[in-house]
Image (tube, grey):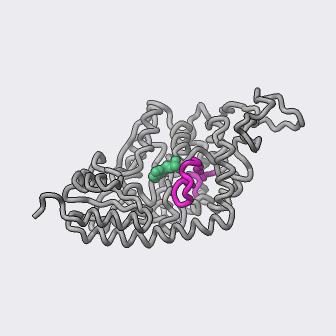
């Protein structure tokens, strides 16, 4: 089919990709999900009195499963409709829900592009779903994703979910939106293309959310854990076709969002706090480029990759020695050596400017025993 004809074809409903046995599934009907009116609430076996520790009296009742204020604030932040967004316990929960709602245990497969975030494969494994890997390849320009090989593997191996990570963890590489769009068009009706944008704020690049109106098999994961500095609040979002969001909600736990976390997130999404987030992100971006080029110039570093995220991946002549020296100085970085193809690599998250200087100063000291 020509490219022009291809774009005219209406995108298929992603409901076709949901497990057949879950398409009409109502899920658990919690007391909060029934839209009833009243003054005296005796339908959820809650305590009529507050705990003494609950000074503000906000914890006695089960929380709203999807608080409208939070959903609207997140939708506004990401530029989608509230009906296209499901809030949950970090994007980790989004990954898990997608695997469970779409893949038949023992039947379908998910596709990952290693090296990548480990939770895609962990969720698949826990669900009894096969994992197909189309590894990224490394070139002088950085990490490359083989979109043609992904499309071929989807057709060949019964893949229903493709997990792309952009910017990638641990590579830091950004995928081109046109390539993601072309893949989603090609896989229309065959697989969901999930774009994990946990680090997109650091990349200053457009989100795949912009593809959604035309391409219903695109799913985007976002989180407040990174740029918004709220990892402990555990607030992540799945952004997708509204019909698919409805299905995921029915597969989700009855009360996924603790009230205190919702309250914190709402404060963090107020205009002043959002302006501070922009400042923090700008600081990380300028520090990142300094750290990457300084790492590249160290004799113990074989290669430090360009990054669009808040970390730098680097290969070392002796990664164990670099890891140990940092640890001895009290600096803990991520050892990537268990990942295929990264046997000499460490991933270093950006810290404060002082912490980044400390990393460089430890790594630039001559190794013990060196002449
Ligand atoms: C690429 C990627 N996706 C998702 C997550 C999970 O984030 P959350 O805290 O929202 O569960 C992480 C966490 O490190 C990540 O690196």
| The quadrant where residue 175 appears | bottom left
Residue 114 horizontal side relative to residue 196, left or right: left
Q: Residue at x 61, y 43 (%)?
A: 15
- Numbered marks: total: 0
Please provide percent x and percent y for residue 33.
Answer: 75, 37
- Pick out the residue farthest to the left: 371
Residue 102 in the image: above or below residue 76: above
Q: Residue furthest top?
A: 45
The one of 326 and 251 positioned closer to us in this rendering: 326
Membership of 221 in magenta stretch: yes
Q: Is residue 154 left or right of residue 139?
A: right
Task: Tell me, yes or no, whether the highlighted magenta stretch contains residue 228.
Answer: yes
Q: In this view of the protein, which residue sits in the foreground, 229 or 218?
A: 229
**Quadrant containing the C terminus in the rendered view:** bottom left
* Residue 316 figure quarter: bottom left
Q: Is residue 175 visible?
A: no
Between residues 216 and 228, which one lies in front from this camera angle? 228
Q: Which region shows up in magenta?
A: 215-241
Observer able to see residue 310:
yes
The residue furthest right is: 39
Q: Position of residue 109 (x, y in %)?
A: 43, 39
147 or 4, nearer to the observer: 147
**Relative to residue 164, is residue 247 drawn left or right?**
right
């Amino acid at each position: 089919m020509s490219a022009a004809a291809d774009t005219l074809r209406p995108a298929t409903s992603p409901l076709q990709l949901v497990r057949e046995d879950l398409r009409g599934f109502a899920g658990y009907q919690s007391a909060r999900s029934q839209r009833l009116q009243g003054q005296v609430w005796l339908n959820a076996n809650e305590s009529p009195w507050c705990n003494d520790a609950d000074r503000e009296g906000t914890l006695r009742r089960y929380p709203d499963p999807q608080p409208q204020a939070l959903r609207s604030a997140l939708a506004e932040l990401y530029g989608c409709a509230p009906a296209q967004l499901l809030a949950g316990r970090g994007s980790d929960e989004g990954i898990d829900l997608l695997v469970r709602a779409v893949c038949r245990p023992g039947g379908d497969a998910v596709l990952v592009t290693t090296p990548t975030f480990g939770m895609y494969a962990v969720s698949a494994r826990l669900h009894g779903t096969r994992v197909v890997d189309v590894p990224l390849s490394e070139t002088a320009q950085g990490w490359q994703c083989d979109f043609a090989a992904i499309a071929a593997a989807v057709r060949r191996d019964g893949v229903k979910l493709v997990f792309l990570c952009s910017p990638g963890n641990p590579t830091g590489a950004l995928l081109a939106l046109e390539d993601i769009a072309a893949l989603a068009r090609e896989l229309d009706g065959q697989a969901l293309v999930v774009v994990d944008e946990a680090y997109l704020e650091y990349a200053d690049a457009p989100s795949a959310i912009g593809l959604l109106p035309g391409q219903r098999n695109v799913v985007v994961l976002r989180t407040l854990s990174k740029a918004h500095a709220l990892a402990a609040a555990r607030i992540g979002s799945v952004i997708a076709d509204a019909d698919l969001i409805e299905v995921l909600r029915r597969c989700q736990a009855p009360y996924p969002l603790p009230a205190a976390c919702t309250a914190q997130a709402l404060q963090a999404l107020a205009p002043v706090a959002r302006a501070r987030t922009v400042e923090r992100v700008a600081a990380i971006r300028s520090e990142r480029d300094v750290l990457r080029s300084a790492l590249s110039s160290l004799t113990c570093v074989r290669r430090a990759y360009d990054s669009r995220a808040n970390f730098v991946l680097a290969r070392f002549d002796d990664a164990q020695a670099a890891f140990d020296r940092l640890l001895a100085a009290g600096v803990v970085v991520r050892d990537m050596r268990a990942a295929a193809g990264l046997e000499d690599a460490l991933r270093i998250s950006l810290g404060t400017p002082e912490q980044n200087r400390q990393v460089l100063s430890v790594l630039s000291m001559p190794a013990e025993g060196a002449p």
